[in-house]
Amino acid sequence: MGAIQETLVHPITIAPSLLSCDFANIAAELERVEACGGDWHHVDVMDGHFVPNITIGPPVVEKIHAAATAPLDVHLMITDPRKYAKPFAEAGAHVLTFHLEVAPTRQEVLDTVDAFRDAGVAKVGIALNPDTPVERVGEHLGDVDLVLVMSVDPGFGGQPFLADTLTKTAWLREQGYAGHVEMDGGLNAETLPRCAEAGADVLVAGSAIFGADDMAGTIAAFRRAADEARR
Ligand code: DX5
Ligand code: ZN
């Protein structure tokens, strides 16, 4: 067993992205995706500033939390994550992830991580856009529970997977990073196993899961393929 495999202690987590669900029937969608085997609900928060799209804020996350059983994996695509640490933690975020691009210095990362931990979230994550070199997260690896490697430019579901980003995940495992590595954007039957093979353990999929005719079969197949790919 090589160095990369030795760090893969986390079971595969499938995190369906609610961005592709039917928001008019959110409670039913949460129940359906949990019954079909989704592990975490991936919640995309966009502010129309860091990304050109606007989604939901803390009051809606709070309603999702009240209706959900599975943990909420809250991905903040917003310019000022520190300001909203407490509202999202209180709304029920289990994982709370901010983007390195909005906290570009060591001190800003530390302040943001502190704000998230003080707010009481279980896990703190840091995300990287496809254009951001992965080496830039190197000095922060000891401070975060999860690194989110974006495999599309953030803002919209349904975009094609950027395969170059796989090398970032592999790099994180080569550094011996033993936290969660999450990949998000363009994951489907073809690309999701490649993410697991590179070392990702949290796999986000929106359109491929909510757009599937057989949601349970799709999630089960994703998990099987991911488990096989990391062997
Ligand atoms: C994109 C979001 C993703 C998105 C993934 O900005 O961060 O979570 O919902 O959607 P798919 O799986 O359709 O690419
Ligand atoms: Zn996301």
Image: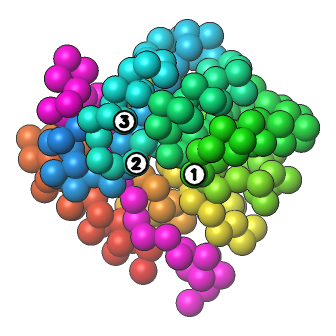
Q: Nearer the viewer, residue 224 or 23?
A: 23
Q: Is mark 1 in CB contact (under 8 Å) with mark 2?
A: yes
Q: CA distance from mark 3 to mark 1?
A: 14 Å
Residue ID for mark 1: 122
Q: Position of residue 189 (x, y in %)?
A: 28, 53
Q: Position of residue 140 (x, y in %)?
A: 80, 51
Q: Is residue 75 visible?
A: no
- The amino acid on which the numbered mark 1 sits, given as a three-letter code, is Ala
Does ligand 2 reach within 8 Å of label 2's beta carbon? Answer: no
The verdict on residue 220 being magenta is: no
Residue ID for mark 2: 71
Secondary element at image label 3: helix
As drawn, is 94 to the left or to the right of 209?
right
Rendered residue at 47%/37% (across/down): 92
Q: Is residue 118 above or below residue 167?
A: above
Residue ID for mark 3: 65
Q: Is residue 53 above or below residue 151?
A: above
Q: Is residue 4 visible?
A: yes
Q: Nearer the N terminus, badge 3 or badge 1?
A: 3
As drawn, is 165 to the left or to the right of 184?
right
Q: Position of residue 40 (x, y in %)?
A: 37, 49
Q: Is mark 2 in CB contact (under 8 Å) with mark 3?
A: no
Image quarter of residue 23: top left
Rendered residue at 47%/12% (across/down): 54
First to last magenta residue range: 1-29
- The amino acid on which the numbered mark 3 sits, given as a three-letter code, is His
Name the quadrant of the N terminus: bottom right
Q: CA distance from mark 1 to mark 2?
A: 10 Å
Rendered residue at 79%/31% (across/down): 103
Label 1 Cα neighbours within 10 Å, binned few <14 / some 14-19 / many ≥20: few
Residue at the far bottom in the pictured view:
1
The verdict on residue 14 being magenta is: yes
